[in-house]
Image (tube, rainbow, N blue to C red):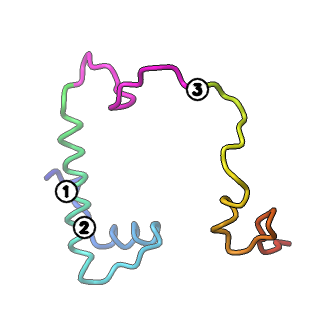
Amino acid sequence: MPEHTIIKPDDVIHMAQLSRLAVSEEEKPLFARQFGDILGYMDVLAGVNVQGVEPLYSPVAHSGRPREDNAENRRERAAMLANAPENDGEYFIVPRIV
């Protein structure tokens, strides 16, 4: 593994803080190794010759025309409000923010 893909426990702590995750002392070496493996694989991918290969924007062939962009009321109000924590039968009720 190239040297620039070696992840130190301090790097794991920094990434965990950025991700708002709690990482235990036992998990730090594991995550450091896994992050290093991921970056090492990126080095392998960077070495692949892609000269003359067109970019792939989607793995699925998109045949057919998209539907017309028309406004439609496809759902009933009662169905939309059914899972709301609070509603008045017509609108969602949310906490006031001032």
Whole-percent x and y of residue 53? 27, 19
Task: Decide which of tag 1 and tag 3 comes sooner along the chain.
Answer: 1
Mark 2 and mark 3: Cα distance apart in space? 47 Å
Most common secondary structure along the magenta stretch: loop
**Callout 1, which amino acid?**
Asp
Task: Decide which of tag 2 and tag 1 comes sooner along the chain.
Answer: 2
The circle drawn on residue 37 is 1
What SS does tag 3 mark?
loop
Q: Nearer the viewer, mark 1 or mark 3?
A: 3
Whole-percent x and y of residue 68? 63, 25
For the residue pair 74 and 42, the one nearer the viewer reads as 74
Q: Tell me the residue at 39%/66% (across/down).
A: 15
User: Circle 2: is it few (<14), some (14-19), or many (20+) Cα within 10 Å?
Assistant: many
Could you tell me which quadrant the C terminus lies in? Answer: bottom right
The circle drawn on residue 67 is 3
Q: Tell me the residue at 32%/32% (across/down).
A: 59
Q: Which residue is mark 2?
A: 32
Q: As drawn, which residue projects farthest toward the bottom?
A: 25
- Describe residue 98's horizontal placement relative to residue 78 as left or right: right
Q: As drawn, which residue projects farthest toward the top?
A: 52
Quadrant in the rendering for residue 58: top left
Callouts 1 and 3 close, C-beta under 8 Å: no
Mark 2 and mark 1: Cα distance apart in space? 9 Å
Task: Decide which of tag 2 and tag 3 comes sooner along the chain.
Answer: 2
**Callout 3, which amino acid?**
Arg
For the residue pair 8 and 37, the one nearer the viewer reads as 37
**Callout 2, which amino acid?**
Ala
Q: How many marks?
A: 3
Whole-percent x and y of residue 88? 81, 70
Q: Tell me the residue at 67%/59% (across/down).
A: 80
Per the rendered image, the range of residues in magenta is 50-66
